[in-house]
Structure formats: structure tokens, C-alpha cells
Image (cartoon, rainbow, N blue to C red):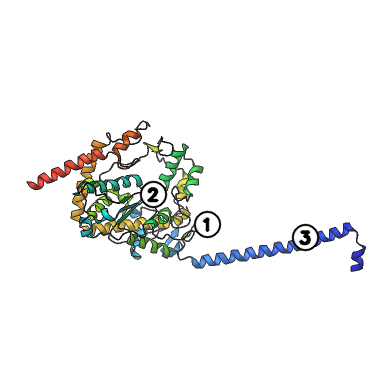
Amino acid sequence: LSVAMARLTPNQEHNLYIRKSNKIFRYFVRFVVFVLFSLGIYLKIHFTLMKTITVTDIHTEHRPNNTHVTKDLDPAEEESPGYNYSEIVRENNLAKAFRYPATAASEGNWCRYGLLYVKVPKAASSTTAGITRRIAAGFESRLNSTTAKCIIKAGHTKGQSYRDRHPESFLFATVRDPTKRAISRAFFQASNEEVNAEDGFMMNYLTNHMAQQGCVSRGMGGFQMSYIPYTPLPPWSAWIKYEPEAVQNAIHIHDIVRQVIEDYNFIIVLERYDESLVALQLLLGLRAGDILYLSSKSSGDYYLNHLNKKCVLIQKSRTLTPNISFYLSSNEWIAKNYGDYVLQEAASQSLDLTIDAIGKEIFGHALQQFISLKIKAGEECSSNAKFPCMRNGTAQIKEAEKDCFVQDEGCGRWCLDQISFLEDHKKHKTSRL
């Protein structure tokens, strides 16, 4: 062989070298393909074993149009797509009555140690932040001190930041139906970017998992499930793109929801906003005037973009196209946001239990009084409030600084104060008679 090799010309030696190299390369490629194939099979088996819930695990079946339906759910009671969330919350004991010690409330310990609001984006966050500041201002005005100030925090800060809070501080948040929150987020962003919310734009935002401007999370059970808990689930542990229609680790999702309800002093359910506010009022021993509000942002109105100081028209959420509607009722969307749906239902059932603990008669009377006061506030203050942007899109920043607490939070405060004062005076006068 060595003699034969010695007789090869340089060109022949080069060709032989190329053939051998190609043969080695082919063997290498086959080896890599085999390794990747084996790894794929391993991951498939691994995630299958990890999965603790599938569509059939909670008694659901597929509809032909790729949505979920719960077998035992009365359609008249179904408010959210997918699963029987009411039953899931009850079976897993995820709800409880919210409480705050009566003595701590009467002594205003929440004022001393902190009124802490986790401002979940696009969940009435600015309106609720304004109410938070109004509660503190009203309480301060009743203190026998000119220097005492309540500690309040009402920024876009995640729940993780309050893990070491004082036990007598008061921590609360707002939750919203994840589909409605996502639609609001997408249309609001379209307004900011001054573009039409076409299908391409909508899909881009409905799959966005940015920390503040996102619609979904990085596989953590939903945007709100990544924002509110002290310790959220790890990324891609509640949903993975390889099994887009399946909920992963449902037991762990339920554990996080249960812990949120335990860790927080109260959670406002946006779909039951006024009920939630009255329950909050009674828990903290407040007056009805302390929770009066005018909405900070409404579709069809202008709001001030604080980055460029420009008034932006908030697009009205119009009828969704069939493609977007289909996606928002798909198994994938439901699986991505399963945790948010369960959290919303747990908060709603916890509100019911809180009302029961307060007493339905006491709560009903307080709610009736608040609604009456709110209607009066809307009639007398809506046209007089100085928001950062006028209804015609003209900025009035200086005027708003005098009539709002911060930016567009708590605007119309002086008019609301007047209504609150007159109501308190009326009650005081009646009690004397």
C-alpha cells in the first residue's frame, strides 16, 4: 500500500484526502442527528412525565372549533373560556376571607407601616393608585397632627418587592380577566404608537411577554401570575411552546394562587370594582368619601404620554377580527393564561367570603351609600376635573398638577373632597338629631 501511495500523483493524493474527509464528515453528521433525535425523545418523555394536567385531567373536552368546554358547567354561569374555574378554586381551597385586624385598622397601623398597592398594568392601575393616595390623604386630614404622613407605595412594582414588608402594613393589588387585560394592553399600545390595531399588530402584542408592557408571561401561568406573587413560578414551567395547548404543573400553579391569597391583605377584582372598593373601605375602617374616584383613563379620551408630554387619543377597543377572536378562545391562549384565570376566580370567591365575614346587611348598606355618592361625584366632578389632557387633546399639565395627586392619578380631588365633606356633614347632622 505504501508503494502504491508513493506512486500516486499529488493531485490523486488530494482527491483521496477529500474522499476520506467527506466520509468522516458524513459519519459525524449522522452522529449529531442521532444525538439530537435522542435528546428530542428524552425531552418529550421528560415533559410528558412532568405534566400534571391536561385537557382531560379536569373533565373538559375539545370542541371542534378548538376551544374548551367544561362538561358539568352551566353555560349561563360561564364567564371565562376554558375550565370550570369556580370548581377548581373550591376543590383546591384557593379562596379565603380577606382580613385585617380591627385594632390595627382603627389605629391606622397601615398608615404607619405602609399602604402598598401592586399596580398591575392595564388593570385600572392608575385609577386605583389615585384611590390609594386619596385614602392616605383623607386619613392624614383626620389625624391630630400636621406632620404625620402615611407611607404609601403605588407604583408599577412587582409583588416580589414586598416580601419582607411589615406584618401590619396593608398590601393589595388588582386582578382582571386576562383576555380583557390583554386587549386593553394591545389597543393602548397601538394608541401610543399611533398605528391601527390590525391583526399583525394585535398578534405581536398578544404574544408579547415584556415585564411591564406584555400581555402574557414567559410560561409562568399568565402576566398577572408573573407580577403579583412574592415568588412567581420559574419561566416556562406553567406553559411550553412544544405543548402549546397543555397546562404544565397545575398543582404548582394552584399553590402559587393559594399563597397569593394568603400573602395579600386584599385583592380588588376589576370586574367587581365597586364591590371590592367598599369591602376595602370596611376592612380599613374608612369613609365612603375616601374611595371616591374618577377613572384616570378611558377609551375615546386623551391621556398624557409622560415621555414626550404629548396628548394621545386612546383607541376604542373595536370588534375583534375573526382571527384574533379565534386565537383568544384557543386552547393555546387558555393554557398560557390558566394561572391568571384561576387567580381571578380565587380573588372573586375571596371577595364573597369577605362580604360574608363583614355581614351582608352591613356591606349592602355601605355599597348603596357609596354608589349614591359615586353617581353624585360623576355628575358634579366629571366636567370640572382637570386631567393632564383636555377632551379636545390639549395638554393642561400645570392645571392638572393642582387637581390630581400624581400625573393622572386621583384627578378631581378637590371636587371629590367637597362631596365627601358635605356627605360627612350630613351624616353628622342626622346623627345629632
Q: Residue at x 24, y 43 (%)?
A: 374
Q: Is residue 227 above or below residue 137?
A: below
Asked if the residues shown at circle 1 and circle 3 are in contact, with their CB atoms under 8 angstroms apart, the answer is no
What kind of element bears circle 1?
A: loop
Q: Which residue is mark 3?
A: 22
What kind of element bears circle 3?
A: helix
The earlier-in-sequence mark between 2 and 1 is 2
389 inside magenta stretch:
no
Q: Quadrant of the N terminus?
A: bottom right
Instruction: State the CA–CA distance, disc 1 to disc 3.
Output: 37 Å
Residue 422 visible in the displayed image = yes
Q: Which region shows up in magenta?
A: 209-218
Q: Which mark is residue 422?
A: none
Instruction: State the CA–CA distance, disc 2 to disc 1.
Output: 28 Å
Residue 333's spot in the image, x, y percent?
46, 53
The earlier-in-sequence mark between 1 and 3 is 3
Q: Residue at x 44, y 57 (%)?
A: 221
Residue 63's spot in the image, x, y percent?
45, 56
- How crowded pointer 3 is (Cα within 10 Å; few <14, some 14-19, many 20+) is rated as few
Q: Which mark is residue 156?
A: 2
Q: Residue at x 41, y 56 (%)?
A: 225
Asked if the residues shown at circle 2 and circle 1 are in contact, with their CB atoms under 8 angstroms apart, the answer is no
* Observer-nearest of 55 and 260: 260
- How crowded pointer 2 is (Cα within 10 Å; few <14, some 14-19, many 20+) is rated as some
Q: Which residue is mark 1?
A: 241
Predominant SS of the magenta segment: loop
- How crowded pointer 1 is (Cα within 10 Å; few <14, some 14-19, many 20+) is rated as few
Residue 217's spot in the image, x, y percent?
46, 54
